[in-house]
Image: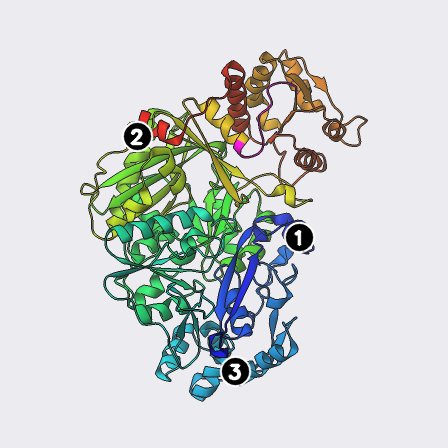
């Protein structure tokens, strides 16, 4: 292999730990046990610093390369967040390779000081090129600009140095003839000609890649897997690639995660291993000039590029960027719902602490607060008082500082429901209605759910379907649509609308046998649902339960209580002809099999004690021994149940933790008392995880477990293939 054929491949793990609040507040250090909760992403380039900075420049990573942030570090209060590290403080988590920071030496002179470069030569080169590039665009020579690009400086970084915006740098760069060149990854080690269509960009004079011929469509993938955006979206991208090939299109895939099927060499006709940034996507579009770009399937990351790509003249297939933005713009969307006569929790938007206090006071506590355009419920919290709200505003605004914070009335005790649908712009077909098993307030990605619903009134189900069709029409949806509803006191509320593929699309597709992502791709190309043979909803005769999988065992010190901020890193599915058995299978698949006998520890908040009664009675009727902390035990005894009292920590021995360590307890049912973890509760939950004792933290979850155990004890588990379930449902 000649020196001209050498390139550097840079891979970086992702630690998206800000979704797990306690880790944010702890010292982030890597240990011998695997803790990465995001897939590695890889970039290729001709020189190491360029590869490093491209790898660090992934969306949702908080920076635009190792050479520093776009803006000065944004301190975020107690979370300790800043834009210095790749991901969320990855440099501090051990990835010293990626930690560069700015040192301002003057109004137009900024040095780039490495915080641990791969070698001093690379560090010095980055520093010098940063100084050279820190000037207004009209004083930036083509040679200096070219050298900065060779060392991996992104357009956004250069825009910050020049005091302008990213697209201005792009226009100036192209005017000066500084363009990205594309190279072929030589998978044959120069032994013979490589035909693998696998490309990367760099800044050199020679471009090795000619644009593909014929009709071609570009798919933007999801980038690194992480909390909130995982292989669910990669599944959709792969299904889209298959559908495009069947329709006679060349498939261009843009993604950077080598762990995904979308980056397999035979999934697409062409693969660009590039970061999913506006600059890199536009560079590929400059070369390929695709018929259209699909960004519905990669999750929130590509969706953020919709408006900017459209402004640059890139054709977006499917739902328009205007409709996407309408669904995200809280004020416009609220006006749309009001015009349609649909209910929505009282809400408002704010950018200051005083605005937030005023809106929350008018709505009434508790409220749900979150930034706009966030991933996996990032920085979303239920806030119970003004003090907590003020604290939240100082921490959360930096997460999405270009968008306002959203404040909604929190519907305590409501039942949440996800509805997935597909529309061709004229006809909308419901893909699936999923009832969450946990109560409202838990992120949809963390909540178990059942398809079809197991406890909702038929009238509520039909009303949600009606509203889904209505919203699809008003938003001019072409492709997939996800709506999150809540049912409270007999009323249906719209919580959120996402005109894109949701993380439940693979689950719904496998539960119903309908390939929604494939069909949505054909719809984006202009086919009607009638032409594709989908004219009515498919409701399976079996029950499918999705359960989340969590990484808590990997993080000692982290409380396991769930909330509106997503924490799960995977999911499983259980199928059967009864809800109880499907739920039991899902728990077994998630690694927490339900016990068939033994002792149940009960310790719940006062607000949950009345609802706990049928749960406790059910376990007693099945022959389980009941153990409870003093307050819960007193309540249950008053209602005629035989309960043994167990000491809290510091109130005598053996206490609740002793019983868990001794193997005396087979199942724990514990609901949190209030804001923040209490000492006893926290240690109870942590010891349950450490000693592999199943623990349930919601009453609805406990009822589902009770039903699962009852069914298991009556008949044992039955096994059928997915194909057999589909055949019995009449799906070919």
Principal SS element in the magenta part?
A: loop
Residue 326 in percent (x, y) is at: 33, 53
Q: Is residue 729 above or below residue 714?
A: below
Q: Is residue 676 above or below residue 86?
A: above
Asked if residue 503 lies in the magenta stretch, the reply is: no
Residue 539 image offset from top left, x and y in percent: 31, 29
**Reading the chain from its start, which is encountered first: label 3 or label 1?**
1
Q: Quadrant of residue 514?
A: top left
What is the distance, in whole Å, between disc 1 and disc 2 at their CAs? 45 Å
Q: Are marks 1 and 2 in contact (CB under 8 Å)?
A: no
Query: SS class of the residue under badge 2?
Result: helix
Residue at position x 33%, y 28% from top? 540
What residue is shown with label 2?
462
Stretch in magenta = 589-599
Which quadrant is home to the C terminus? Answer: top left
Write down the residue under mark 1.
Answer: 25
Looking at the rendered structure, the secondary structure element under dot 3 is loop
Relative placement, left or right, of 720 versus 693 is: left
The verdict on residue 593 being magenta is yes
**Residue at image mark 3:** 134
């Amino acid at each position: 292999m000649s020196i001209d054929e050498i390139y550097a491949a840079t891979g970086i793990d992702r630690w998206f730990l800000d979704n797990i609040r306690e880790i944010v507040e702890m010292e982030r250090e890597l240990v011998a046990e695997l803790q990465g909760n995001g897939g590695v992403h890889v970039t290729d380039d001709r020189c190491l610093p360029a590869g490093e900075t491209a790898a660090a420049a992934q969306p949702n990573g908080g920076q635009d390369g190792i050479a520093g942030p776009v803006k000065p570090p944004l301190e975020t209060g107690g979370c300790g967040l800043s834009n210095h590290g790749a991901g969320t403080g990855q440099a501090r988590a051990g990835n010293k390779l990626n930690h560069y920071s700015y040192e301002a030496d003057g109004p137009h002179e900024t040095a780039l000081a490495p915080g641990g470069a791969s070698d001093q030569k690379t560090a010095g080169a980055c520093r010098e090129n940063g100084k050279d590039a820190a000037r207004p665009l009209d004083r930036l020579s083509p040679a200096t600009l070219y050298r900065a690009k060779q060392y991996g400086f992104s357009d956004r970084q250069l825009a910050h140095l020049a005091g302008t915006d990213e697209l201005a740098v792009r226009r100036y760069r192209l005017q000066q003839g500084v363009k990205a060149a594309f190279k072929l990854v030589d998978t044959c080690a120069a032994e013979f000609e490589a035909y693998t269509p696998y490309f990367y960009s760099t800044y050199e004079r020679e471009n090795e890649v000619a644009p593909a011929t014929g009709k071609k469509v570009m798919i933007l993938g999801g980038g690194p897997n992480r909390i909130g955006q995982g292989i669910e979206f990669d599944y959709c991208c792969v299904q889209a690639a298959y559908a495009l090939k069947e329709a006679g299109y060349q498939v261009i895939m843009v993604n950077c995660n080598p762990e995904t099927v979308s980056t397999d060499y035979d999934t697409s006709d062409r693969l660009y291993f590039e970061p999913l940034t506006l600059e890199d996507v536009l560079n590929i579009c400059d070369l390929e000039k695709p018929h259209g770009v699909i960004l519905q399937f990669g999750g929130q990351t590509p969706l953020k590029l919709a408006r900017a790509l459209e402004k640059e003249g890139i054709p977006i297939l499917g739902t328009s960027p205007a409709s996407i933005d309408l669904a995200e713009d809280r004020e416009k969307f609220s006006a749309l719902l009001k015009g349609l006569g649909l209910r929505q929790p009282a809400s408002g938007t704010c950018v200051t602490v005083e605005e937030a206090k005023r809106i929350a006071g008018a709505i009434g506590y508790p409220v749900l607060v979150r930034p706009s355009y966030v991933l996996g419920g990032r920085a979303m919290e239920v806030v119970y008082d003004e003090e907590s709200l003020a604290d939240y505003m100082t921490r959360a605004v930096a997460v999405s500082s270009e968008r306002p914070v959203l404040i909604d009335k929190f519907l305590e005790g409501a039942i949440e429901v996800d509805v997935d649908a597909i529309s061709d712009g004229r006809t909308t077909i419901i893909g699936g209605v999923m009832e969450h098993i946990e109560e409202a307030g838990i992120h949809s990605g963390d909540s178990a759910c059942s398809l079809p619903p197991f406890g909702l009134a038929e009238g509520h189900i039909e009303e949600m379907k009606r509203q889904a069709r209505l919203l699809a029409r008003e938003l001019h949806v072409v492709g997939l649509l996800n709506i999150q509803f809540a049912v409270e006191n007999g009323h249906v509320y719209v919580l959120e609308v996402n005109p894109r593929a949701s993380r439940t699309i693979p689950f719904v597709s496998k539960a119903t046998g309908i390939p929604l992502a494939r069909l949505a791709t054909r719809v984006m190309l202009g086919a009607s649902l009638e032409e594709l043979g989908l004219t009515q909803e498919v409701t399976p005769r079996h029950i499918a339960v999705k359960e989340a999988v969590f990484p808590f065992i990997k993080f000692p010190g982290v409380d396991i209580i769930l909330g509106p901020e997503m924490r799960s890193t995977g999911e499983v599915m259980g199928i059967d002809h009864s809800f109880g058995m499907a739920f039991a299978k899902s728990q077994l698949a998630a690694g927490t099999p339900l016990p068939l006998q033994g002792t149940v520890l009960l310790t719940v908040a006062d607000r949950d004690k009345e609802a706990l009664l049928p749960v406790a009675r059910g376990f007693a009727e099945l022959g389980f021994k009941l153990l409870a902390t003093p307050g819960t035990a007193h309540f249950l005894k008053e209602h005629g149940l035989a309960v043994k009292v167990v000491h809290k920590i510091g109130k005598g021995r053996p206490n609740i933790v002793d019983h868990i360590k001794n193997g005396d307890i087979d199942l724990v049912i514990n609901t949190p008392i209030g804001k923040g973890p209490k000492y006893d509760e926290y240690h109870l939950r942590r010891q349950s995880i450490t000693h592999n004792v199943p623990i349930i933290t919601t009453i609805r979850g406990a009822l589902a477990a009770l039903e699962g155990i009852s069914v298991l004890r009556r008949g044992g588990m039955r096994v059928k293939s997915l194909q057999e379930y589909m055949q019995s449902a009449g799906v070919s």
